[in-house]
């Protein structure tokens, strides 16, 4: 696995680990909902409902685990995502759903395993919003997080400290 694929996979795992614990679905942006609706309509898929998902936002806003201030999660389990769309067209549909402020960061496609991952980012005041879309043959996940950019950079420089705040981790190019 190439380094960029490994880093992207680690990032996706990082976001999903945060989401698996105290996850939340709270009113953030309409872009997230448009991406989820696009997946639902394209694949005739239904989201897996996760009990008490919305209640965790209070904890996330107060504790800011891993620097995450808020996030949304949509999980599709036991669905048929085996028919991959035209990747170029699907990317264009996702980017249209997101709007012009979002920029693609990572694009990974594995034809052998029938999986693809896209990570998009945009500024949100003093924070950064990231949207991760992964589709596999039997499941899909869409995660949107609002995170402090300094902590994101520290995590990117030290992915082995996944899930923590990376306290004391130097930022690339930063002087001590």
Image (tube, rainbow, N blue to C red):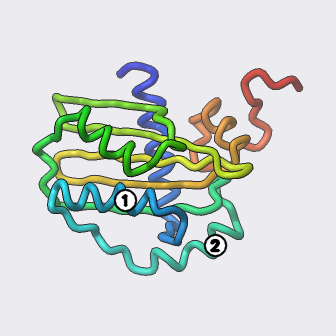
Secondary structure beneath disc 1? helix
Residue at point 50%, 66% (across, down): 23
How far across and down, in percent of the image, does residue 155 sit?
A: 63, 38
Badge 1 crowding class, 10 Å Cα cut-off, few under 14, some 14 to 19, many 20 or more, is: some
Tell me, for residue 34, which label it has, or none: 1
Q: Position of residue 132 (x, y in %)?
A: 43, 46
Quick check: marks 1 and 2 in contact, CB under 8 Å?
Answer: no
Q: Is residue 47 left or right of residue 23?
A: left
The residue at 44%/55% (across/down) is: 143
Dot 2 lies on which element? helix
Q: Position of residue 17 (x, y in %)?
A: 48, 54
Q: CA distance from mark 1 to mark 2?
A: 26 Å
The percent position of residue 35, horizontal first and vertical second, equals: 35, 55
In depth, the one of 50 and 167 nearer the eye is 50
Disc sitting over residue 59 in the figure: 2
Quadrant where the C terminus sits is: top right
Q: Which mark is residue 55?
A: none
Q: Is residue 170 above or below residue 152?
A: above
Q: First in sequence: mark 1 or mark 2? A: 1
Q: Reply above or below: 105 against 144.
A: above
Q: Residue at x 33, y 59 (%)?
A: 36
**45 to the left or right of 125:** left
> Toward which corner of the image does residue 79 lie, by quadrant?
bottom left
Instruction: Report which quarter residue 101 is drawn in.
Output: top right
């Amino acid at each position: 696995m190439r380094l960029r694929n490994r880093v992207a996979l680690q990032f996706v795992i990082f976001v999903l680990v945060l989401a698996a614990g105290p996850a939340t679905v709270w009113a953030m942006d309409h872009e997230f909902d448009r991406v989820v609706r696009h997946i639902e309509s394209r694949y005739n898929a239904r989201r897996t409902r996760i009990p008490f998902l919305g209640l965790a936002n209070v904890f996330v806003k107060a504790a800011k685990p891993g620097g995450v201030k808020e996030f949304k999660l949509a999980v599709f389990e036991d669905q048929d995502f085996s028919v991959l769309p035209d990747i170029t067209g699907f990317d264009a549909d996702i980017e249209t759903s997101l709007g012009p402020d979002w920029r693609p960061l990572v694009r990974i496609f594995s034809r052998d395993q029938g999986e693809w991952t896209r990570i998009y980012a945009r500024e949100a005041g003093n924070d950064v919003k990231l949207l991760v879309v992964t589709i596999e043959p039997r499941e899909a996940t869409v995660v949107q997080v609002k995170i402090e950019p300094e902590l994101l950079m520290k995590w990117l420089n030290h992915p082995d400290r996944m899930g923590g705040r990376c306290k004391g981790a130097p930022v690339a190019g930063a002087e001590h």
